[in-house]
Amino acid sequence: MWRVLGDPLVPGDPAGPLHGRTVAVKDLYAVAGQRVGAGVAAWLAEQQPVQRSAGVVETLLAAGIDITGITRTDQFAFSMAGRNADYGTPPNGAAPGRIPGGSSSGSASAVALGQVDVALGTDTGGSVRVPASYQAIFGIRTTHDLVDRSGLLDLAPSFDTVGWFTREAALLSTVGRLLIPEPRRRSLAVNRVLIIPELQTSAEQDIADTTTRVADRTAEHLGVPLEEWDIDAGRLDGWLDAFRTIQAYEAWQIRGEWIMAHPGALESEIEARFTAGRDGAAEQVERARGVAGEARATVQDLLSDAVLVQPAAASVPPRADDADRITGVRAGNLRQTCLAGLGGLPSVSVPGLGTGPLPYNICFVGAPGTDVDLVELAERMTSA
């Protein structure tokens, strides 16, 4: 799970309020004196140590948190499986023998196995929410552009966000208060709790049943009604197509030149996701941006006074040796995760609410800027 490991790798400020805590950093963030490897051996070989750490890394160090090391990621973060042809697959701390989830795989594993208190990840299409679900830990995808992304290697800037993992909701909130300045926070105003039946039909039955039960408990806890949003399946699929088109296009614009110059450097499945962006016509991308804009406006309006409760992932973690199943669950997972991505919304992946033998999380999704309040709601629901 580690690309670079120290004891610590970089010490935090001993006078900081979180001195004694430890953090793992996904190998997309700049750490002063280290190279950024992005999960690709050929890329790492060409990099030089950076002079300055990413903005959020500097903030954590100033708060006293020690950096334990730099964690593995799926190649260029363009996967949700957690596998890596160059470096192998980090262990699943909650379900041995099953994939850890990605792309923030090493970070999630480091937290799940108790090797650090906090781990930085990123979430474009689910890369925090899914590994948190697969390893039964807390994770947050933050509101798009709310948390400083300076010094972070991009995948698709329209959807890229900073995220992090913890084993306790209280620490998830503490880090949120540190990384999200008070003036940028919004209060969570909840007049209703929403579920989306179409999303639940895409999930395994136990996950769908738990989602309904948690939503009902949340509505009762808040004293508001539980409502269903009956979005048409075709409309939801159109939104997902738009998300994937834009993601692939932006990813190719950023990395395409390097990929063409390094044939064979990427796993074929991941390279195909990049080249899909190369092959997209300009008018197709423009149409996708129009659809994405409509989706963003719709979901932001819908959640202006509501909280959405939904599956964090469509399935429990597949076995690490079941390649067909791993490929098969990707589309279902993206169907769950794309709404928060399109809407630029915060989403908290919460463990411990299900009853099955294998791990899965439930997500709480709120209006932009309500990240800290959303975590606090999730914390209350885990103890309710």
Image (cartoon, grey):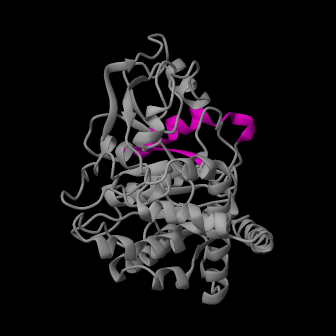
Left or right: residue 272 compared with residue 301: left
Image quadrant where one finds the N terminus: top left
- The residue drawn where x is 40% and y is 58% is 267
Left or right: residue 243 compared with residue 304: left
Name the one closer to the observer, 382 or 321: 321
Residue 250: give x, y in percent of width and height: 67, 56
- The residue drawn where x is 71% and y is 47% is 186
4 versus 302 height, above or below: above
115 versus 287 height, above or below: above
Image quadrant where one finds the C terminus: bottom left
Residue 124: give x, y in percent of width and height: 57, 55
Q: Is residue 299 on the magenta stretch?
A: no
Outermost residue toward the left?
96
Report if residue 153 is visible in the image: yes
Total marks in image: 0
Q: Is residue 168 on the magenta stretch?
A: yes
Left or right: residue 92 compared with residue 80: left
Q: Which range of residues does the magenta coloring cover?
A: 160-184
Q: Quadrant of residue 248?
A: bottom right
Residue 332: give x, y in percent of width and height: 46, 76
Report if residue 190 is visible in the image: no
- The residue drawn where x is 61% and y is 71% is 224
- The residue drawn where x is 74% and y is 67% is 296
Name the one closer to the observer, 178 or 57: 57
